[in-house]
Image (spheres, helix red, strand yellow):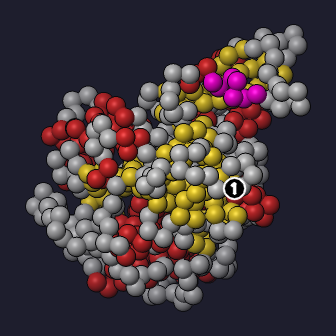
Amino acid sequence: MNGRPDQVDVHHPQLHQPQLHQPQLHHPHLRTLVQTASFHAEHRPTTAAVLCEGRTLTYGQLHRESNRIAHALGAAGLAPGDRVAYLGKESEHYYEVLFACAKSGTVLVPVNWRLTAPEISHILQDSDTRLLFLEPEFAPTVEKMPTAPPETTVELGERFRAWKASHPDSDPPSHATPDTPVAQLYTSGTTGLPKGVVLAHRSFFAIRAALASEGLDWIDWRAGDLALIGIPGFHIGGLWWATQNFNAGTTVVALRAFAAREAVGLIRDLGITTACVVPAMLRMLLTEPGVGARDFTTLRKVVYGGSPISEALLEEALAVLDCEFAQIYGLTETGNTAVCLPPAAHTPGDPLMQAAGRPYPGVRAKVIDTEGRELPPGAVGEVCLATPARMVEYWGLPGKTAETLVDGWIHTGDAGYLDEDGYLFIRDRIKDAVLVAGENVYPAEIENVLEGHPGVAEAVVVGAPDERWGEYVHAFVVPAPGQRPTPRDLHTFLVPRLAAFRLPARYEFIDNVPRNPSGKILRRELRDRFWTDSARQVN
């Protein structure tokens, strides 16, 4: 690490196991990430902020290095509101850039490194990114983009270190407020093009403040915690979990990319106390050969979400990991979690185990019919959430923003109901999203590309249940006249055009697509046969 050679303080949980009676770490005066960085640099400069691949970044170093980058962004001509993209796997540098953007008033655009060149090109063009931080591993992908890269590209490595070192580590001037945009995350789109969700600083403070105000420990942060980030930082779950731990002043353990064997090793050898994962990751941890309860003895809490979880998997995880579990539900548009199933509700056999949870203090949930009327408990309709952590807007899409954010309510596109006690149960999707290992995949994205194949007349994509990944992508294909494409042909065509998690796992050739009298595709008719034996129409 660059910066002063600090003495590093890593609270090893096996030596300093957090006690349940310890107070939560909450600093109510912190309301922006700028304040977070400076506060912890002053009060715990030698405490490890990030551990990654054996490297340590202290809070003092995080503050100084992000200061240097903030100064460098200004020297490069970037002004508040300009977009800065990051294309790379998890590392301490990602968090340095995050705090630098917060301090300079620029907006961080984390790019999913699994995307293809055309998909990355869309994000960089749509966001009008002016500077790109790029890991060398992904330079060949950027070179294949159909459009020119941003005007400035800083390759992580020696050039990045030299670029930082040429600027001072003093505090840059900052005018950040809780409503200042700080991040823009891209979500899959119903029209085939991802939308940029703009989030302000408040999105990363509102929920923890609500929990603290009521003295709730549904999700908590305690002295000595080592927090594993299983979800990548380009996903709202990963970014939110990291910022919560930074705001508390605990230590984040960053995985470059999730691998079950590595994750188990870190939990066991470092003494990880908390973790945030999607259900597919839980399954991988439990099925890793040779892994057992002895590997998870230091865990005190697992936060999970991103997709529904089966009761069987949850009960196995509760038994093997033997710690508290908290389920979170929300969207990028809600600033991540808006609803939580607290640890006390995680009792095998309890009907609440099928619930998404209940809203946090200060968050409201309602269920509406197609006319926008609020429905009574038990009636299924569209779930709407009102939360102080909600998005600012969809970048450059005022019409889409107005459709999703209505009078302060986020319309989720999920179908569910509230019970008499205010617990939310998700039953289906109103939108057509497929959830693959916690990633939203919209059929239109795949259908648009598939229909570019000369052998395809029409394509319809649905989600089907999958034991490991939650759901898989199933493509129905109507061949073009005189054409007989094979699944291999279609797969080969899609590989350079779609990220791997968006690729169909199975293809089914049909003579025609079912439609109603007005010509609308009867997607549900194609999807239903995969879900006939499931009480819940999402997995």
Tell whether position 433 is magenta. Answer: no
For label 1, the SS is loop
Image location (x, y in percent) of residue 408: 65, 68
* Residue 351 or residue 194, whichever sits in front: 351
Task: Determine which quarter of the picture holds residue 80.
Answer: bottom right
Q: Is residue 470 above or below residue 30?
A: above
Q: Amino acid at mark 1?
A: Arg
Task: Determine which quarter of the picture holds residue 283.
Answer: top left
Residue at left offset 38%, top offset 81%: 28
Residue at left offset 72%, top offset 29%: 523
Q: Is residue 351 left or right of residue 114?
A: left
For label 1, the crowd category at 10 Å Cα-Cα, with few meaning under 14, some 14 to 19 and many 20 or more, is: few
Return the residue at label 1.
373
Tell whether position 527 is magenta. Answer: yes
Residue at left offset 85%, top offset 17%: 480
Residue range (magenta): 522-528
Q: Is residue 105 above or below residue 414?
A: below
Image location (x, y in percent) of residue 517: 88, 27
